[in-house]
Image (cartoon, grey):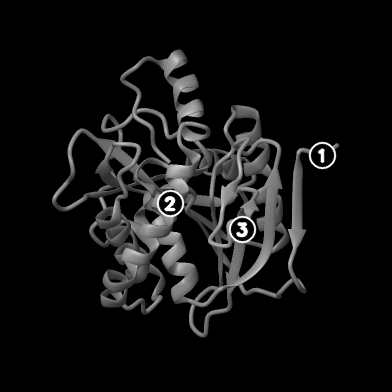
Amino acid sequence: MSTWKISQIGKKPKLKSPVFIEGLPGIGNVGKVAIDFLIDELNAKKIFEIHSYSFPHSVFVNENNLVELPKIEMFYKEMKKGPDLLLLGGDVQPVDEIGCYEFSDRILDILQGFRCNEVITLGGIGLGEIPKKPQIYCTGNSRKMIKKYSKVNVNSKLYGVVGPIVGVSGLLLGLAEQRKIEAIAFLAETYGHPMYLGIKGAREILNVLNANLGLNLDTKKLDREIKDVESEIMKRTEQLSEVSRSAALNKLKSKLGQETDYIG
């Protein structure tokens, strides 16, 4: 039996030179907050829904008091100007190393099917206190990509600031390089507490994406809507408790030491 169930929703669109952006839950949920806002604001359409035995062994209880399996979804947006977009968001990340590799490879298979030119991943850098104005760092598998995307309020000097980039946000960069797909990660400083939501960090990342991709996002609307996003994410984070991220993090810490920063 396959570990992965990837269901296509509707007809596969014909996209022009799409840019892929990933934002899954991680420290501060920075990437998730940013990608959820992008999906809503751009009115993106769902193209894939993904379930897996590598996701946490839990279900969510929804507003109708019914259960839902955790899932990851891919959306697309056909843009009037510039490249089209593929957006990946969801409830969880795979909880084990093999699952994370398999998932990242499956996503890259899909991206190559769309002739995707660039991969962008979003994540957070956990700090010991809440940053007043989060700094945005970047790294990637191509100096060309870093030069292209680090012109607007982005620090490309990440070496020595953090340890390994754990999870899908990191693996997609490395595995994309093997396929000669250029990739970059934007990482926002955020408070490292597992229940903290890095709203400010997500906002700064969105500003960077807005400037580089010409998305015409209404940042004032972000400030208004982010409270609703925060409420929904908090509910799901509380339901997951220690089942998902903590299991993966503890496993990593046992190998690399207790001072390891979790980025994702």
Disc 2 target residue: 235
Looking at marks 1 and 2 on the same chain, the residue that comes earlier in the sequence is marked by 1
Q: Secondary structure at mark 3?
A: strand
Looking at marks 1 and 3 on the same chain, the residue that comes earlier in the sequence is marked by 1
Amino acid carrying label 1: it is Ser
The residue positioned 39% from the left and 51% from the top of the image is 234
Report the Cα–Cα distance between label 2 and label 3: 19 Å
**Mark number, residue 73:** 3
Left or right: residue 104 versus residue 253 is right
Asked if residue 152 shows in the view, the reply is yes
Which mark is nearer the camera, 2 or 3? Answer: 2
Q: Secondary structure at mark 2?
A: helix
Disc 1 target residue: 2
Observer-nearest of 38 and 234: 234
Residue 181, image x, y percentages: 58, 51
Amino acid carrying label 3: it is Glu
Left or right: residue 195 versus residue 19 is left
Residue 22, image x, y percentages: 51, 54
Q: How many marks?
A: 3
Observer-nearest of 142 and 239: 239
Q: Secondary structure at mark 1?
A: loop
Pointers 1 and 2 in contact (C-beta within 8 Å): no
Look at the picture and state if 226 lies above or below 53: below
The residue positioned 58% from the left and 56% from the top of the image is 65
The residue positioned 48% from the left and 34% from the top of the image is 245
Q: Which quadrant of the rendered structure holds the C terminus?
A: top left
